[in-house]
Image (tube, rainbow, N blue to C red):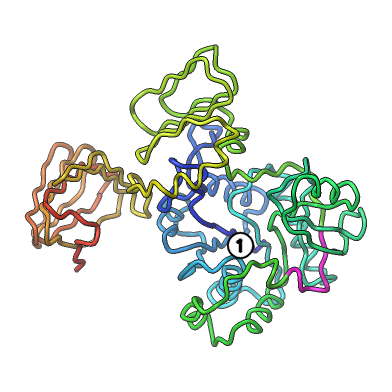
Amino acid sequence: MNIVLLSGGSGKRLWPLSNDIRSKQFIKIFKTRDGSYESMVQRIYRQIKAVDEDARITIATSRAQVSSIHNQLGSQVGISVEPCRRDTFPAIALASVYLSEVQGVNPEESVVVCPVDPYAEEEYFQALKELQQQADKGEANLILMGLQPTYPSEKYGYIIPADNKKVSRVLAFKEKPDAKTAGEYINNAGALWNGGVFSYKLGYMLRKVHEMIDFDDYNDLVRKFESLPKISFDYAVAEKEEHIQVMRFPGQWKDLGTWNTLTEAMEEHCVGNATMDDGCDNVHIVNELEIPILAMGLKDVVISASPDGILVSDKDQSSYIKPFVDKLEPQSMFAEKSWGSFRILDVGSESLTIKVTLKAGHGMNYHSHRNRDEVWIVIQGAGQAIVEGVTREIRTGDIVSMKAGSRHRVIACEELQLIEVQLGRDISKNDKQKY
């Protein structure tokens, strides 16, 4: 299979675990068989490979997510990097040209596009294979997956099929309705949820892209990407396509976009250092902090704690969190990168203290800071520190000091954990000169 996973924005409805730096699909919240935890993107990647170990997986995303993707999936996954956010059609357009020119996919091969963050089981991924096989037949230019509704939802658009066969011609699309209208679509027209899952032959999409914008090759499209209109794939392509089919999927599928839906998919009520008494009912706690959380006598509540903040909310009300988070404008206190991760421990008026974890074989850029001194305290592992061209071996317990203006870097020979203390009156992430 050729699969494009659309990895979208921050998912602020899952604050404080998700933010502009760490999107919801990277939160490690699903327990695996060995007792560790995996994220949405790790889960869907593993599930695709279980169904088709030779699947070519490409993630369409922004530059801000690239490090997190490499951190969690390694370097083997393909990434189509959008220079800026322009909605789903431009993202799919760029990913399609990426498949053609960078990955060398034949225009006659079919491609499946789906979101990166659904919660589903093996039958869903088997259905993705069937969707591609249906596209291979060439009976239609575009094959949609229609999800069998479990209730009249206001969150989804609806696909109206011509009949109740497994594969049907599409009669119409309906925008997100109110609950009453959604019920009428389902009961009277056999409507299906439009979950943004579809398949097409690559050559078809390449033609559509060239119709939308004049470009020479992939690099040229990257340069012109910002000039593409902000338009969804449904508006730009699906609703205008005459030769279009829908394939029913009656199995389990959930959009884990809110705390309410996410906790429904959690196997455990407590993740992290958390305890609740017998008086708690339908309570979930996710704690990324080292301090304990105790819940007593609560009902229908979610509690989430991370370095970015603490949420205590009724589960139904948690769906309305976004406008409140937009007003917070907090500093991101944790992020995963391709080289490891960092967590801000303390922010002072003239100091910043950070815990940095470097993966074995990775290191910081050789750089300097104009306005601050820095101190590294090695708390675990071994590596090399280079300060003004002088290299020294470092290991647990060592301390390295750098004055403002001095060039420095650190390389991890094995996983290396540092406490980095920044000291100065003007501490800014922009105060960095790379060499």
The picture quadrant where one finds residue 215 is bottom right
Which range is magenta? 238-246
Q: Secondary structure at mark 1?
A: strand
Residue 20 highlighted magenta (yes or no): no
What residue do we see at 21% from left, 44% from top? 382
Q: Is residue 219 above or below residue 15?
A: below
Report the side of 182 relative to 399 (left or right).
Answer: right
What residue do we see at 68% from left, 81% from top? 207
Q: Nearer the viewer, residue 128 or 232?
A: 232
Residue 353 image position (x, y, % from top left): 20, 42
The picture quadrant where one finds residue 386 is bottom left
Residue 153 image position (x, y, % from top left): 73, 45
What residue do we see at 69% from left, 78% from top? 203
Q: Nearer the viewer, residue 426 or 414?
A: 426
Report the side of 308 relative to 55 (left or right).
Answer: left
Q: Residues within 10 Å of mark 1 (few under 14, many from 20)?
A: many
Q: How many marks?
A: 1
Report the side of 142 relative to 272 (left or right).
Answer: right
Q: Is residue 416 above or below residue 224?
A: above
Q: Nearer the viewer, residue 324 or 162?
A: 324
Residue 201 image position (x, y, % from top left): 72, 72
Q: The disc labelled 1 sits on which kind of residue?
A: Val
The quarter of the rendered structure image containing the N terminus is bottom right
The quarter of the rendered structure image containing the C terminus is bottom left
Residue 46 image position (x, y, % from top left): 58, 47
Mark 1 sits on what residue?
4
